Amino acid sequence: MRDPMDFRRGVILYWIPAFAGMTRQTMNILKRIQIFIQESYQEMNKVNWPTKGETTKYTLIVIGVSLVVAVFLGGCDFVFTWLLNKFVISR
């Protein structure tokens, strides 16, 4: 029959250090995540954010340019379709 002290020694000598090592590694990962979040927050405070007026202005510019490009490409498509129908396909 096995000695009950063998089990206790096994727990003390194997499982407790293994758990302690896992805990240290887990704490190291959590500390690194905390440092990353803190540094990210500091960098976000350094960003020169546009004002509400600038954001609105740039958004309207993007929408306007997108509409102009869409009209231009739609016109090109219409013209090329008309030319193909008139000279190539109708023959």
Image: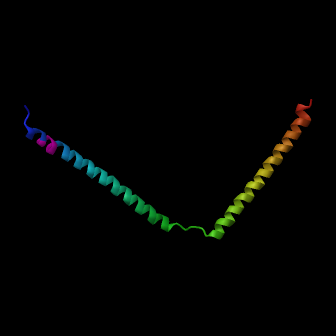
Q: Main secondary structure of the magenta part?
A: helix
Q: Is residue 9 magenta?
A: yes
The colour style of the image is rainbow
Residue 78's quadrant in the figure? top right
Quarter holding the N terminus is top left
Q: Which quadrant of the view contains residue 54? A: bottom right
Name the spot of residue 90 as percent of width and height, x first: 92, 31
Residue in view at x 60 percent, y 68 percent: 50
Asked if residue 45 lies left or right of residue 7, the reply is right
Q: Is residue 28 above or below residue 90?
A: below
Give above or below for 20 relative to 87: below
Residue 45, how many percent across, how many down?
Answer: 48, 68
Residue at the (49%, 64%) spot, across then down:
44
Give the total number of marks visible in the rendering: 0
At 52% from the left edge and 66% from the top edge, which residue is drawn? 47
Magenta residues?
8-13
Which residue is at the front of the view, 55 or 80?
55
**Is 85 positioned to the left or the right of 68 in the image?**
right
Could you say where residue 63 lies in the image, as x and y percent from the top left?
A: 72, 58
